Image (tube, rainbow, N blue to C red):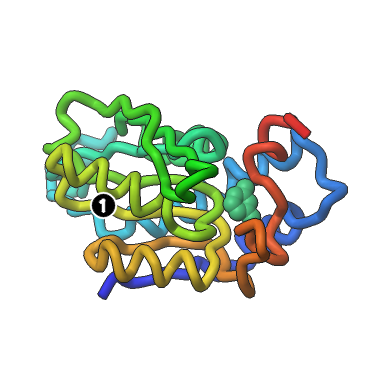
Amino acid sequence: MANLHIIDHPLVQHKISLLRDKNTGTKEFRELVSEIAMFICYEATRDLPLKEIELETPLAVAKTKIISGRKLAFIPILRAGLGMTEGVTTLVPAAKIGHIGIFRDPQTHTSVKYYSKLPEDIAERDAIIVDPMLATGNSACAAISELKSHGVKNIKFMCIICSPEGVDNVRKTHPDVDIYAGVMDEKLNDENYIVPGVGDAGDRIFGTK
Ligand code: URA
């Protein structure tokens, strides 16, 4: 069963409270999403393997550690996931970035992939999908399936707020994928928004409403 990691650090919790406030404007909202993404990414990368190397400091030879092994890719789900990209790439500048676009078919209510552009070597990379809101989990599941269909073996999912329904869905559909979130909210409303949530994260990041 996939693990759910809630990053309950006081700075993350404080910044999520600022996000929730309906009076928080676009500029501040965007900055907060990026900062929170950085903190959550710090935890999501905790298990990156290290190797020991030797190098010369100005004073002596040091045995010291660097990240080794498989490389990383971040995969923002369009469009709100873009708001987390700057934060996560600040921490891992060498990571490549793929994009997956998914919309909900109004007739069938299923998640439809309309865009996918992944690094050529994605099958050799570990992938962290980023999307601020894990609501129904349908987009998350579709994005995970898309990565698996390209041969990606090690996938994590990062969000800022998750719902119990979304976590259940990902856990059932993709039990091998760990979820990293800042907080789990109460429920989804009839329109599949997370309550209390932050409203429409994409609109608030890009100022489209
Ligand atoms: N997407 C959002 O932007 N907000 C929600 O509450 C749910 C999905």
Q: As rendered, which of 126 and 133 lies closer to the eye?
A: 133
Q: Amino acid at mark 1?
A: Ile
Q: Residue at x 29, y 37 (%)?
A: 73
Q: As rendered, which of 117 and 42 lies closer to the eye?
A: 117
- Quadrant of residue 56 within the rendered picture: top left
Give left or right: position of 143 versus 199.
left
Q: As rendered, which of 171 and 112 lies closer to the eye?
A: 112
Q: As rendered, which of 192 and 205 lies closer to the eye?
A: 192
- Quadrant of residue 16 within the rendered picture: bottom right
Expressed as whole percent of the image width and height from the top left, the position of residue 1 reads 26, 75
Residue reaching furthest right? 23
Q: Residue at x 87, y 48 (%)?
A: 23
- Which residue is disc 1 drawn over? 155
Q: Residues within 10 Å of mark 1 (few under 14, many from 20)?
A: many
Give left or right: position of 208 versus 78.
right
Expressed as whole percent of the image width and height from the top left, the position of residue 22 reads 83, 51
Res. 97 visible in picture: no
- Quadrant of residue 95 within the rendered picture: top left
